Image (cartoon, rainbow, N blue to C red):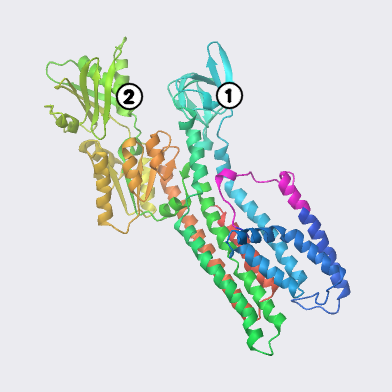
């Protein structure tokens, strides 16, 4: 079998019988039908003329010049044209040693010594194998294909009193669109009006529809099911969920695993060795042993060439990985390439961010603690002014609390806004310098402040013009599936779970204890998270480490570990870009099943490699000693490839 170009960019849906074939495949099928008829007629002619002169290896010896001979050659040309063409094309590219070359040399040599029947049979089996290979590849592509269908063809853009159908790429952030029942949501946005059920199975793998209401975020690619929705666009098309998913899927196949790279290198060495070995097997006995029968040793060399073709490995290994990527995507976990699937299968430790990963990232203000002489209202309003420019969940909770407590909230003029990683925010609000963040931010700006060391929530300290105003305590909610997810990872054999957080130690400890995290480190800046991962590597140099995070602050550590895993639904663009695996549903309970799929995929890869190599070396040995015939050659090539392909796509 030839090595398939298994890329998402050329995904085609599985065909139903012959009715779903495209024009090119129909022409191919017609060509093979004609070739098959000619072959059958040649068989009948050969058998009728040689009924009492049959041998197992060469039933039509002595047919030179007979009509059957030319019919076999015509049938060979029909079935073998693609193989011969690719062999010549690769030779011109100086890529000589490949499956096309081996198949061409073997069958041409068979024709030369009068083995027409065998030569055509090999080509027929080759094309049949190609057909089943294509079916196997298409089946494994189905879940990937579903993801590629998430793009909406148009957006219903509200323009004044009218609604126009436009290309989603032409819609700007802040525009208002309508999504009717039955339509795909074309762009990420916030529901302004309406309540409905949406089908997010194409993104998350979850078949149960979910409800969306005013204020909820909806992602591009989901299908609106029941009611009209009016949505304010929050991301342009290039940064939308649908576009990011398609980009990740299209690039996934280009990232080969170590196993795939090894198979490629192995084939480059293995193929010329077996080709030279076959030629030596053919000609050394003929040249050095006077009694050697040339046709017999050439026949053995032909069998050797057919058996040694490495196409079973070329196909089954990448197909196994592609199938694993497809199985993961069907469950809402996008793996950006087979190399990350291989690493995921060998993960020893998982490191988590806290906010938005272990917890929901849904915050509520639970306490406002002003300094002496400062009112609750003044502290909250000052904090809301600077936090209004941030998209962090904590910032949103403070702004929401301010709006809830004020019938007529003030408008803020914010200048020189700066987000200081791992510390907080600094800006001029209505002409006054305001700081809002953790204790490190206060210390860095020489602000005398009172530390809150007892509360279990996140604390935001606020200062204005160098004066400490007080602090606000915000509490997060642990995700419902967090405890279950951690237990599943331990059951799966993960040796250690660690949580890294920029939050205060009491808040981080409370979360870690609740969900069963083994080790926790808090009050960390982004570079300190990387340092903690480095310490884990130093303590366990042989371990493979995964990191799960969602925020822009997690991008450095996501890039450092063996496999970075991002929360795709609420995760920042930087985190999703830096990650190797994306969990589209933001459910960490998806992680253990993804690891199980990766491990199952690697088990199948090893099974295929072992099975292929054992069968091939056994039949190669038989060929050397003259105990293998054309049947065994076909079994060791096309048969083995077919079995390996079916094994590759079985459920993971």
Q: Is residue 520 visible?
A: yes
Q: Dot 2 corresponds to which residue?
A: 396
Magenta part, dominant SS? loop
Q: Residue at x 24, y 30 (%)?
A: 424
Quarter-wise, where is residue 9 in the image?
top right
Tell me the element at label 1.
loop
Does residue 548 sit above or below 304 in this rendering?
above
Q: Is residue 431 left or right of residue 547?
A: left
Q: Is 274 colored magenta in this rendering?
A: no
Q: Is residue 519 visible?
A: no
Q: Position of residue 401 (x, y in %)?
A: 30, 19
Does residue 119 sit above or below 416 in this rendering?
below
Label 2 crowd (10 A; few <14 / some 14-19 / many >=20): some
Tell me the element at label 2.
helix
Q: Dot 1 corresponds to which residue?
A: 181
Cα–Cα span, label 1 and label 2: 31 Å
Q: Write the start and end of the magenta stretch as one range.
A: 3-30
Q: Is 12 colored magenta in this rendering?
A: yes
Does residue 514 sit above or below 342 in this rendering?
above
């Amino acid at each position: 079998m030839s090595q398939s170009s298994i890329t998402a960019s050329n995904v085609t849906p599985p065909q139903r019988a012959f009715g779903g074939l495209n024009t090119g495949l129909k022409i191919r099928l017609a060509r093979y039908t004609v070739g098959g008829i000619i072959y059958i007629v040649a068989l009948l002619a050969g058998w009728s003329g040689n009924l009492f002169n049959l041998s197992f290896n060469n039933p039509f010896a002595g047919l030179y010049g007979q009509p059957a001979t030319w019919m076999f050659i015509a049938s060979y040309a029909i079935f073998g044209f693609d193989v011969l063409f690719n062999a010549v094309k690769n030779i011109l590219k100086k890529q000589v040693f490949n499956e096309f070359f081996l198949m061409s040399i073997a069958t041409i040599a068979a024709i030369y010594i009068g083995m027409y029947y065998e030569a055509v049979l090999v080509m027929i089996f080759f094309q049949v194998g190609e057909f089943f290979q294509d079916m196997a590849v298409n089946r494994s592509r189905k879940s990937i294909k579903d993801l590629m269908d998430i793009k909406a063809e148009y957006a219903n853009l509200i323009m004044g009193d009218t609604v126009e159908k436009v290309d989603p790429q032409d819609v700007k952030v802040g525009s208002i669109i309508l999504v009717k029942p039955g339509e795909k949501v074309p762009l990420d946005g916030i529901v302004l009006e309406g309540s409905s059920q949406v089908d997010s199975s194409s993104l998350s793998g979850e078949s149960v529809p979910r409800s969306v209401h005013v204020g909820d975020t909806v992602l591009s690619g989901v299908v609106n099911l029941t009611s009209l929705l009016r949505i304010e666009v929050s991301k342009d098309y290039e940064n939308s969920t649908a576009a990011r998913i398609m980009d990740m899927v299209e690039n996934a196949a280009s990232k080969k695993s170590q196993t795939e790279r090894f198979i490629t290198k192995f084939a480059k060495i293995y193929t010329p060795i077996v080709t030279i070995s076959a030629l030596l097997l053919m000609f050394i006995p003929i040249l050095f042993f006077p009694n050697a029968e040339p046709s017999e040793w050439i026949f053995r060399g032909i069998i050797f060439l057919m058996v040694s073709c490495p196409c079973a490995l070329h196909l089954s290994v990448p197909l196994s990985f592609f199938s694993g990527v497809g199985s993961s995507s069907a469950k809402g976990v996008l793996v950006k390439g087979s190399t990350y699937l291989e690493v995921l299968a060998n993960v020893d430790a998982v490191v988590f961010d806290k906010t938005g990963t272990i917890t929901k990232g849904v915050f509520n203000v639970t306490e406002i603690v002003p300094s002496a002489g400062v009112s609750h209202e003044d502290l909250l309003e000052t904090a809301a002014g600077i936090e209004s420019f941030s998209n962090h969940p904590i910032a949103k909770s403070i702004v929401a609390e301010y709006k809830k407590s004020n019938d007529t909230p003030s408008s803020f003029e914010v200048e020189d806004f700066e987000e200081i990683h791992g510390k907080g925010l600094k800006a001029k609000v209505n002409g006054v310098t305001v700081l809002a963040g953790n204790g490190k931010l206060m210390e860095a700006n020489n602000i005398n402040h009172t530390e809150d060391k007892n509360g279990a929530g996140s604390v935001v300290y606020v200062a204005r013009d160098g004066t400490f105003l007080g602090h606000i305590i915000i509490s997060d909610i642990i995700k419902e599936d967090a405890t279950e997810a951690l237990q599943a990872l331990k059951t799966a054999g993960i040796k250690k779970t660690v949580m890294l957080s920029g939050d205060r130690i009491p808040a981080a400890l409370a979360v870690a204890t609740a969900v069963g995290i083994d080790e926790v480190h808090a009050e960390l800046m982004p570079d300190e998270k990387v340092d903690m991962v480095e310490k884990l590597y130093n303590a366990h140099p042989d371990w493979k480490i995964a990191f799960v995070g969602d925020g822009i602050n997690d991008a450095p550590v996501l890039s450092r570990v063996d496999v970075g895993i991002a929360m795709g639904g609420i995760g920042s663009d930087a985190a999703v870009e830096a990650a190797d695996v994306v969990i589209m549903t933001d459910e960490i309970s998806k992680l253990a099943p993804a690891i199980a799929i990766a491990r199952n995929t690697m088990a199948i890869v090893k099974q295929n490699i072992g099975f292929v190599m054992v069968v091939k070396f056994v039949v190669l040995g038989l060929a050397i000693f003259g105990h293998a015939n054309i049947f065994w050659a076909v079994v060791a090539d096309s048969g083995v490839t077919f079995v390996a392909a079916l094994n590759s796509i079985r459920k993971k």
